Image: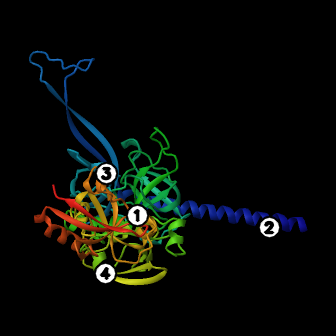
Amino acid sequence: MQRLFILIFFLNIIFAQNSVVRQFSKAFADVAEKAKPAIVTIITDKVISLNQFDDFGYFFFQPNMPRQKEYKTNALGSGVIVDAENGYILTNNHVVDDMDGIRVKLIDKREYEATIVGTDPKTDLAVLQIDAENLDDVKLGNSDNIRVGEWVMAVGSPFSENLSHTVTTGIISALGRSNIMNAQSYEDFIQTDAAINPGNSGGALLNMEGELIGINTAIATGGYEKGNRGVGFAIPSNMSKRIMSDLIDKGFVTRAWLGVFIQEIDSEIAEAFDISTRNGALITDVVEDSPAEDAGIKEGDVIVAFNGKTIADPANLKNVVSLTAPDSKNKVELVRDGKTKIMDVVLKELPDNPREYASKRSDRTKVFGLDLKKITKSLKKQYDIESDEDVLVVTGIDPEGEAYEKGIREGDMIKNVGTKRVKTIKEFNRLVEKSRNKGAVLLLVKKPNGGSRFFTLNYN
């Protein structure tokens, strides 16, 4: 009798396990069945003109033969219908960039010519539109709610049209991946081990509710091979939604700007700035007349949260700020001198060339080959300066300039221009310009060891 009970017990476990497996399998099949009609194959055409060359690379001309010949090439990608009523399709910019023709093929074999609504190379996103009826779309999920370890499904067209609507599964391997494509991009990738291959670009990454949580974009191959190695990357749906909205409404993306230069926090920096976390972004420079300066943010501040969301690193801050609406009021939590502060910041629209804008900031100058900055806590530590005076610090110097020849060195402090005390770069520039008609300027320079002396620098 005891053996019978044991047998029945184990049979119940086996039946229960089989039931769970069947339910699990059915959940995947339901997601795939619902999503596949909204996933499209994108075939792009490009006409390339090539000169006629012989086998040795020299131009080879025959009478009555054209000097150029045109070739049509094809490329393959994927896309996701996100608005069936208007025919909007979300895909990658690199799938459609600089192409002469774009065709969209649906799961029912219908094909349509697509037009580009807008593209955003910095996030590698693009929105296409087709004029078609009876379309299916995928609901956009909230990518902020996903967790590492969750099951996901990738759908796309790897390698060829014959493999369209291929379904692969895996888990979310990591979140917030950046510096995958290049440093100039806005990256906040979802990493997944669901198989993603060439042709999957622009396809869907779905959660187990069948919601779109990412646009498949890139793979890490670990070598020259093009196949999947279990490391794929997708653009989060929340970033895609914000970019898509701008592209549809305006045809371009509007980004916000804080106006700071930032770096990561390591153990040494955390100890020096008396902060307990390695998360956040350290402010190394603040641009003049920027939202950051207007709000009172300073060099040496560490931004640890933005509108209540923890900032993991500089790339995270860059993404969060850029996706926030310009002219909006935001709460920035930062650490200054070991104490937490919360500041209100009204963001501005990102300038066309922020680096050029930043180069015009007035907290530094290069007059006479000198690179000057207003003294800060970090500069004191860097140059071992013990003075508490408001001075300008020489942070760089041209070794072929007159200032260097006269004996001024990096780490020196500028106290006066002539007999006038200077505390800011604006004051320095104004007094130097005022003395230009005299042909020379007098600078009072204090050395880190405490000694001071006047230097005369001549205008060329």
**Mark 1 or mark 4: whose residue is earlier in sequence:** 4
Residue hosting label 1: 315
Between 396 and 50, the one lying in front of the other is 396
Residue hosting label 4: 295
**Mark 3 or mark 4: whose residue is earlier in sequence:** 4
Looking at the rendered image, the disc whose residue lies closer to the viewer, 3 or 4, is: 3
**Mark 3 or mark 2: whose residue is earlier in sequence:** 2
Q: For residue 76, which quarter of the picture?
A: top left
Q: Mark 1 and mark 3 in contact (Cβ < 8 Å)?
A: no
| Dot 1 amino acid type | Ala
* Secondary element at image label 1: helix
| Dot 2 amino acid type | Phe
| Dot 4 amino acid type | Ala
Point out residue 435 in the picture as x, y percentages from the top left corner: 15, 68
Q: Mark 4 and mark 1 in contact (Cβ < 8 Å)?
A: no
Report the Cα–Cα distance between label 3 and label 2. 85 Å
Report the Cα–Cα distance between label 1 and label 4. 21 Å
Label 1 packing within 10 angstroms: few (<14), some (14-19), many (20+) = many
**Mark 2 or mark 4: whose residue is earlier in sequence:** 2
Between 91 and 389, the one lying in front of the other is 389
- Residue 264 visible in the displayed image: yes
Point out residue 242 in the picture as x, y percentages from the top left corner: 31, 68
Q: For residue 303, which quarter of the picture?
A: bottom left
Between 447 and 293, the one lying in front of the other is 447
Report the Cα–Cα distance between label 2 and label 1. 54 Å
Looking at the rendered image, the disc whose residue lies closer to the viewer, 2 or 4, is: 4
As drawn, the label of residue 399 is 3
Relative to residue 32, is residue 48 drawn left or right?
A: left
Residue hosting label 2: 9
